[in-house]
Image (cartoon, grey):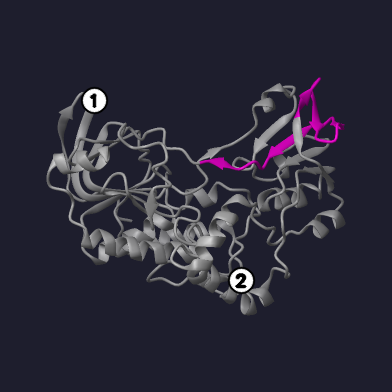
Amino acid sequence: MNTTPAADTGGVVGPGIVGIGAVDTVIIGAGQSGLALGYYLAQQRRDFVILDAGTRVGEAWRSRWDSLRLFTPAKYNGLPGLPFPGDPLAFPTKDEQADYLEDYASRFHLPVRPSTAVTRLSHDGQRFQVTAGTRRWTAANVVLATGACQLPRTPGFAADLPSDVVQLHSRHYKNPAQLKPGPVLVVGVGNSGAEIALETSRTHETWLAGKPSAELPFRHGRTAARFVFPVVRFAGLHVLTTSTPVGRRALPKIAAMARPLIRTKVADLRAAGVHLVPRVTGVEDGEIVLDDGRRLPVANVIWCTGFTEAYPWLDIPALPLNWREQQHRGIVDALPGLYLLGKELIFAEASETLPGVGRDAKYLAKQLAATRAPQHAAEVQSRLAA
């Protein structure tokens, strides 16, 4: 795999900085969205680099729980220029998806820099400054393609549980071998919570806390992949978008709703003996307290409570607090040259999914090709102040 950034030069350039590279575009994140954009920028022969904190491409997939399979069939899991291999109606494992992404980056010689965690992103009035430890790149454009699963979110009262209770966020759960003997409480009835609760119920008495969300009105599997998923994919890519009247009405409602259960349904959980209970409201005397007043003495808690999207390394004071909402198809209005990719509902219902990132990356690559970076600092500053 090509891991050398374009125009990377050496030399001491400032306190603690041992190297600097000047490129046209820095992509932060080598997941599916960053790689898809890299494919199109490489076709344009653009000067760019892809920075990623992981030690290898696909690490975000490899680090999830062992039994995780994708909800989308293989025929929809490929990126531009390379179909996903194998049975098109099969649902790949997370490791198969990770291997595909690693092969993709290698096959198209994308300039990925692994083990390169961004520690600061700033703007000097003319160009972006991207710092990763002792390395720095300057760029006319920066694309944030870091994905949705950034900082695990857990409630504050989790710290009130006794120290002998095993606590894991879904981000760190691998398999039931991590758990101690005794009951398991899974908190959060999303797809992660439902699938993990089903798995732990095979070895532990399992409780699942939360309000069940909606369910897809069909059984997940090969038949759905053949006949139903094409319709769902078309709607998510072309109907439920910010460019259509129905999409503009529906997307805010979708954003406010929990995602429907896809593969594991409430009936499956009940059949497996999972106890469905109300949401957790706190901890008292070392026991979990439920919304109905019941208390649960548990030995293990798995928090399937989602993630927080955060950019603690973003150091551009002129950006408004709601800059992520002030965007159009990933183009950030407040600062020319700053882009978002692979974010939930950024343009369409499918923008965060594998079928969606390729289409959105193609659009963004065209915008990058057509947009001339601002040449004068005054122009940038006036836009920031507007």
Which residue is painted at 12% across and 47% down in the image? 375
Which residue is painted at 59% across and 71% down in the image? 232
Tell me the kind of residue under disc 2. Ala
**In this orientation, which residue lies closer to the viewer: 365 or 166?**
365
Tell me the kind of residue under disc 1. Gly
The label number, if any, that marks residue 90 in the structure image: 2
**In terms of image quadrants, where is residue 328?**
bottom left
Which residue is painted at 26% across and 48% down in the image? 336
Q: Horizontally, is 63 left or right of 343 in the view? A: right
Q: Horizontally, is 56 left or right of 333 in the view? A: right
Q: Position of residue 166 (x, y in %)?
A: 72, 31
**In this orientation, which residue lies closer to the viewer: 249 or 11?**
249
**In terms of image quadrants, where is residue 265?**
bottom right
Q: Is residue 77 visible?
A: no
Per the image, label 1 sits on a secondary structure element best described as loop
Residue that label 1 marks: 16
